[in-house]
Image (cartoon, helix red, strand yellow):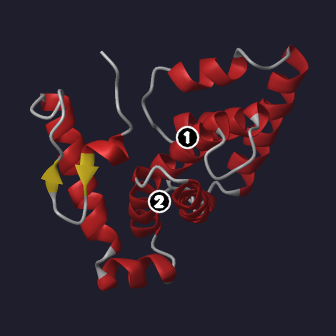
Amino acid sequence: MRLTKPSRLFDCSSRKVRSHALGKSPLVLALASFLLTTAAAAQDPALVAKAQSGDPAAQNSLGDYYSALNTPEGYTQSASWYRKAADQGYPKAQYSLGIAYCWHEGVPHDYVQAYVWLDIAIAGKVDDQNHWLNYAASHLTADQISQAEEQAKKWLQAHSEKTAP
């Protein structure tokens, strides 16, 4: 069975799941619900205003929206919003930014930076059982892992007062 990119399964403008072999599966319906929620989020002026004024949860929501567009421009926007929230100590955004570095989505392909942000996110209680951290580590040398851990430690020390939910 061939999987289709999420953006091709769901048309945000018509809010209907496109006719597809997977169109009625729970996974596709859950994806459709996620895309509807994030599409609505980006069109909510109050949310956009909150994000622009520095609210990390709103910034993360916009990052999710732009990431779901599944386009190079969307990834660039999502990485920008994730970075703003991540710099404020928002663990979900730190996690998403780390994954973006793994997959070169809006940021350079950089496993050291991926490791740094994932390590910071896990310290902020994002629970992924170290899956993505281990993935990034599998592409690094021992010296690069040490360098990434040192960067994460310095970031955590410098931002110890910034702990968002």
- Residue 83's place in the image compared with 124, above or below, is below
Q: Nearer the viewer, mark 2 or mark 1?
A: 2
**Is disc 2 placed on a helix, strand or loop?**
helix
Observer-nearest of 151 and 100: 100
- Tag of residue 63: 2
- At x 70% / y 14%, what residue is drawn? 138
- At x 35% / y 33%, what residue is drawn? 4
Is residue 43 rendered to the left or right of residue 26? Answer: right
How many numbered tags mark residues here? 2
- Across and down, in percent, residue 32 comes to 20, 47
Outermost residue, right direction? 143
- Tag of residue 144: none
Report if the CB atoms under discs 2 and 1 are less than 8 Å apart: no
Q: Quadrant of the N terminus?
A: top left
Neighbourhood count class around disc 2 (C-alpha, 10 Å): few under 14, some 14–19, many 20 upward: many
Is residue 29 rendered to the left or right of residue 129? Answer: left
- Across and down, in percent, residue 109 comes to 74, 39
The answer to which quarter of the image holds residue 49 is: bottom left
- Across and down, in percent, residue 113 comes to 74, 40
- At x 27% / y 42%, what residue is drawn? 9
Q: Quadrant of the C terminus?
A: bottom left
Question: Looking at the image, is mark 2 or mark 1 earlier in the sequence?
Answer: 2
Q: CA distance from mark 2 to mark 1?
A: 16 Å
Is residue 29 rendered to the left or right of residue 61? Answer: left
- Tag of residue 121: 1
- At x 51% / y 52%, what residue is drawn? 93
**Is disc 1 placed on a helix, strand or loop?**
helix
Residue type for callout 2: Gly
- Residue 15's place in the image compared with 91, above or below, is below
Residue type for callout 1: Ala
